Image (cartoon, helix red, strand yellow):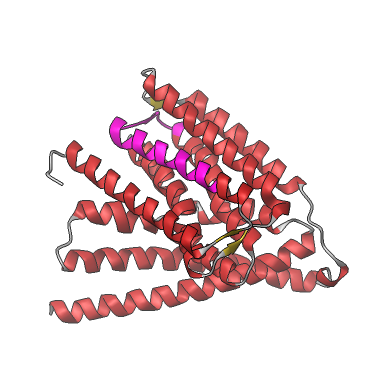
């Protein structure tokens, strides 16, 4: 009976992954059309629209956790997702395909990386001096930063030639409908992938702590991962960077801000500080690579993935210590 159930879950997992991959392709194709029609840069589309929609899992988990007084889950979800967005998504994309770093987007990428690093550093400072929570006031400030960030992202206009502007209103409306439906499919199929993966892991008696540190942690970033890989494969690097880096800014402003308003977001110090430090390190590495190198190569992608594995190992070790379990 177990084998039959395992096969059924495996088939469901494969179907979900196939739907996720196809929906991600459609998202990228129609995001490019919308970018051209509205005269918004692909980076801005990734920074704002795709990033907000793909951050819905983090937003729902964080707000629900905060309402129930589990702010530590909200904080862990935000920073775990931010680390995965850079080290896992861009790392995997570079390792498989290689990523060209387009100079015209460097200023915007640098600004958002600086924004997320400063917010992370402030939270570390706030925690060290004894304020182990983000409250209502901090939540409002973060939401204010999000509104400024949204205005900034929409303000930048791309350099579009005449050949790229031949999309009429009817085609733009169709692109918007396909884009919206595909985003919904990405989020739903991502949820099915995570659920099926968890059930398979439980069938094979894999430890719950390991499931939490890997499948669930990566699962909340699965929409960004699937869309990012599809964008990189189609050489739409602005969309890939915009989604990965933009999701981080949205997680730290909109998601964390919304979570802090119902209840203070409290933290578990060793695990939280480690996640914050890894988030800052990931930002610094990406900034260095984007500023110095013309391309994130496969070797660079491998280094990103290795650092992500180290992060998972550290968090797993600290979690084991908190629970009094031998790692």
Which residue is at the front of the view, 227 or 184? 227
Relative placement, left or right, of 117 versus 325 is right
- The residue drawn where x is 59% and y is 67% is 231
Q: Is residue 285 magenta?
A: yes
178 above or below 136? below
Relative placement, left or right, of 274 versus 123 is left
Q: Is residue 227 magenta?
A: no
Relative placement, left or right, of 51 versus 175 is left
Relative placement, left or right, of 304 versus 52 is left
Q: Residue 41, located in which quarter of the rendered image?
A: bottom right
Which residue is at the front of the view, 217 or 67? 217
Placement of the N terminus among the 4 image quadrants:
bottom left
User: From this viewpoint, which residue is outermost toward the right?
Assistant: 162
18 above or below 225? below
- Residue 96 appears at what percent x and percent y? 48, 69
Q: Residue 190, located in which quarter of the rendered image?
A: bottom left
Q: Write down the region rendered in magenta.
A: 260-286
The answer to whether residue 70 shows anywhere in this view is no
- The residue drawn where x is 51% and y is 26% is 138
User: From this viewpoint, which residue is outermost toward the top?
Assistant: 129
Which residue is at the front of the view, 196 or 106? 106
- Residue 265 appears at what percent x and percent y? 39, 31
- The residue drawn where x is 13% and y is 38% is 324
- The residue drawn where x is 52% and y is 76% is 22
Q: Is the magenta stretch mostly helix, strand or loop?
A: helix
- Residue 123 appears at what percent x and percent y? 45, 28
- Residue 272 appears at what percent x and percent y? 34, 35
272 above or below 91? above
How many numbered marks does the figure carry? 0
The answer to whether residue 38 shows anywhere in this view is yes
């Amino acid at each position: 009976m177990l084998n039959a159930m395992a096969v059924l879950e495996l088939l469901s997992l494969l179907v979900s992954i196939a739907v996720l991959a196809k929906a991600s392709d459609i998202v990228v194709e129609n995001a490019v059309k919308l970018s051209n029609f509205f005269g918004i840069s692909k980076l801005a589309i990734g920074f704002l629209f795709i990033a907000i929609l793909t951050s819905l899992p983090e937003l729902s988990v964080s707000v629900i956790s905060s309402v129930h007084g589990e702010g530590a889950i909200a904080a862990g979800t935000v920073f775990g997702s931010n680390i995965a967005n850079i080290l896992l998504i861009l790392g995997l994309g570079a390792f498989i395909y290689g990523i060209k770093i387009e100079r015209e987007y460097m200023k915007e990428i640098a600004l958002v990386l600086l924004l997320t690093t400063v917010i992370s550093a402030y939270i570390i400072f706030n925690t060290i001096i004894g304020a182990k929570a983000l409250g209502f006031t901090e939540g409002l400030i973060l939401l204010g930063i999000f509104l400024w960030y949204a205005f900034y992202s929409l303000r930048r206009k791309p350099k579009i030639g005449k050949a790229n502007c031949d999309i009429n209103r009817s085609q733009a409306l169709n692109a918007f409908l396909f884009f919206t439906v595909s985003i919904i499919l990405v989020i739903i199929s991502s949820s099915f992938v995570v659920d099926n993966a968890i059930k398979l892991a439980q069938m094979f008696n894999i430890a719950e702590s390991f499931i939490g540190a890997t499948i669930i942690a990566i699962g909340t970033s699965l929409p960004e991962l699937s869309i990012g890989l599809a964008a990189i494969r189609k050489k739409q690097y602005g969309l890939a960077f915009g989604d990965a880096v933009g999701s981080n800014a949205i997680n730290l402003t909109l998601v964390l801000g919304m979570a802090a308003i119902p209840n203070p977001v409290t933290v578990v110090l060793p695990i939280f500080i480690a996640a914050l430090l890894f988030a800052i390190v990931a930002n610094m590495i990406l900034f260095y690579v984007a500023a110095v190198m013309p391309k994130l190569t496969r070797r660079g992608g491998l280094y990103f993935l290795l650092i992500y594995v180290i992060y998972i190992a550290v968090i797993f070790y600290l979690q084991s210590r908190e629970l009094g379990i031998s790692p």
